[in-house]
Image (cartoon, rainbow, N blue to C red):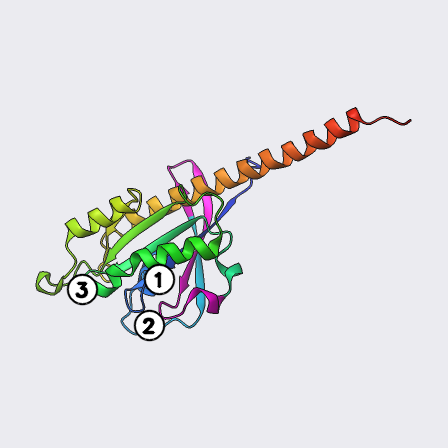
């Protein structure tokens, strides 16, 4: 029997109000969809145990935030400790797509991540089930945006029909676990450095 500590992964979903963040969260965690969700006030989260690459188990906390709220209103502490950030836009809403960079930049400022250049983001173009005549954000534009943000993973999803939802969240879980392990390794290195410095000081000191 393994005694390995179970990882708890914190994933935050960001994007404008109405892009389907709550629907995506419920589709993934509960495999349910409803058109009756009320606008999220503040923040809410659901948890799901996930198997990653068949040999790793983790508990993923999926945090859904109110798209119309600014980061400061929820408190900086809310964003601290995130292992992955999911950026969601609506393929039928140009403004939600244009705001993706702002959501990313504000997250980096307020989450205070240690290595912003390597922190994992995943981009989701939601409501892909919508009739083509209503889609205003092209796949090419989305691919160019993902490339400009550091070649982050991009998925076209539908919370309504479940298209690509599980696939996207598998990548999200994988990215979050890697970030979680990197943070743990970094903490251990810093801790060991502090111990070594203390030991060096003790060795060099003398009682005169």
Q: Residue 111 in the image: x percent, y percent?
A: 47, 54
> Do tag 2 and tag 1 residues touch (Cβ < 8 Å)?
yes
- Mark 2 is surrounded, within 10 Å at the Cα level, by few (under 14), some (14 to 19) or many (20 or more) other residues, namely few
* In front of the other: 153 or 165: 153
Q: Residue 204 in the image: x percent, y percent?
A: 78, 25
Distance (Cα) linking label 2 and label 1: 10 Å
**The image quarter in which residue 98 lies:** bottom left
Distance (Cα) linking label 2 and label 3: 19 Å
Q: Left of 67 or right of it: where is 155?
A: left
Residue that appears at 35% across and 48% down: 121
**The image quarter in which residue 203 lies:** top right
Q: Is residue 87 above or below residue 174?
A: below
Which is more N-terminal, label 3 or label 2?
2
Q: Residue 186 in the image: x percent, y percent?
A: 54, 37
* Mark 2 element type: loop
Q: Which residue is mark 2?
A: 37
> Is 204 part of what is drawn in magenta?
no
Looking at the image, is mark 2 or mark 3 nearer the viewer? 3
> Which quadrant holds the C terminus?
top right
Name the residue at the front extreme: 208
Residue that appears at 45% across and 55% down: 109
> Which quadrant holds the N terminus?
top right
Give the label on residue 92, or none.
3
Q: Is residue 168 above or below residue 202?
A: below
Which is more N-terminal, label 1 or label 3?
1
* Mark 3 element type: loop
Q: Residue 56 in the image: x percent, y percent?
A: 44, 38
- Mark 1 is surrounded, within 10 Å at the Cα level, by few (under 14), some (14 to 19) or many (20 or more) other residues, namely some
Q: Which residues, given as a range, are shown in magenta? A: 50-74
Which is more N-terminal, label 1 or label 2?
1
């Amino acid at each position: 029997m393994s005694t390995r500590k179970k990882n708890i992964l914190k994933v935050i979903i960001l994007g404008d109000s109405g892009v389907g963040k709550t629907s995506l969260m419920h589709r993934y965690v509960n495999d349910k969809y409803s058109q009756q969700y009320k606008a999220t006030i503040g923040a809410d989260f659901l948890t799901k145990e996930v198997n990653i690459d068949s040999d790793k188990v983790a508990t993923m906390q999926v945090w859904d935030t109110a798209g119309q709220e600014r980061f400061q209103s929820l408190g900086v502490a809310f964003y601290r400790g995130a292992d992955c950030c999911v950026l969601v836009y609506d393929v039928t809403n140009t403004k939600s797509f244009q705001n993706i960079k702002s959501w990313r930049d504000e997250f980096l400022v307020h989450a205070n991540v240690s290595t912003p250049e390597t922190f994992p983001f995943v981009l989701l173009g939601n409501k892909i089930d919508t009739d083509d005549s209503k889609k205003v954000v092209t796949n090419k534009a989305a691919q160019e945006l993902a490339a400009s943000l550091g070649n982050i993973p991009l998925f076209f999803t539908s919370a309504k029909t479940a298209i690509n939802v599980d696939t996207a969240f598998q990548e999200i879980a994988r990215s979050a676990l890697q970030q979680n392990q990197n943070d743990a390794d970094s903490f251990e290195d810093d801790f060991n450095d502090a111990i070594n410095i203390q030991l060096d000081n003790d060795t060099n000191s003398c009682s005169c």
